Image (spheres, rainbow, N blue to C red):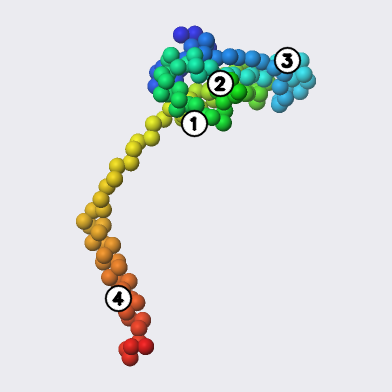
Amino acid sequence: MSRSDLVLRDGRVLPKTCFQLSFSRGGGPGGQNVNKTETKVDLRLDLAAAESVLGASDVARIREVLKARLDGDGFVQIISSEHRSQFMNYEAAMARMQGLLATALVRRAKRRKTKPTWGSQQRRVEGKRHRSEIKRGRQGTDGS
């Protein structure tokens, strides 16, 4: 495992061959430094290559959850230009990619249907009975 591999929270490792990395001149902090150095990082995850590590079902889940982040080729795209150095932007992009993949791969627990408890049913009926008594007490004694 090299430094540029991405370790997911469940222990799986995406190798650097699954990623495309490019640099360009970016705006943001840095003064005149941004006019001469390529600090902006464009990190893309090739889901087709990642399928060997993640599996088809997880890749389909990532495509569904992160469809707003997919580019025209079906890669998950992260752009980072908030720091002055290329390395810091690379680290930020990798951390953001790791977070996105972690949230996309979370499985929601299925809801199990439950019945109301006996006590909750009794409290509900008693509350209805109480409201009925209050409303009955508002009525006039002559029936009007």
Locate residue 19, reporting x and y percent. Answer: 55, 14
Q: Secondary structure at mark 2?
A: strand
Cα separation between marks 2 and 3: 26 Å
Give me the residue at 77% from left, 18% from top.
35
SS category of the residue bearing label 1: helix
Dividing the image into 4 quarters, which one contains the C terminus?
Answer: bottom left
Would residue 65 be found to the left or right of residue 30 on screen? left
Q: Which of pointers 2 and 4 indicates the residue nearer the eye? A: 2
The reply to whether callout 4 and callout 1 are in contact (CB within 8 Å) is no
Q: Nearer the viewer, mark 2 or mark 3?
A: 2
Secondary structure of residue under mark 4 = helix
Q: Mark 4 touching mark 3, by CB under 8 A?
A: no
The kind of residue tagged 1 is Val
Q: Marks 1 and 3: which is nearer the front?
A: 1
Q: Position of residue 90 (x, y in %)?
A: 60, 18
Give 16 or 59, whichever is nearer the viewer: 59
Q: Amino acid at mark 3?
A: Thr
Q: Which residue is mark 2?
A: 75
Q: Amino acid at mark 2?
A: Phe
SS at badge 3? loop
Residue 65, numbered circle: 1
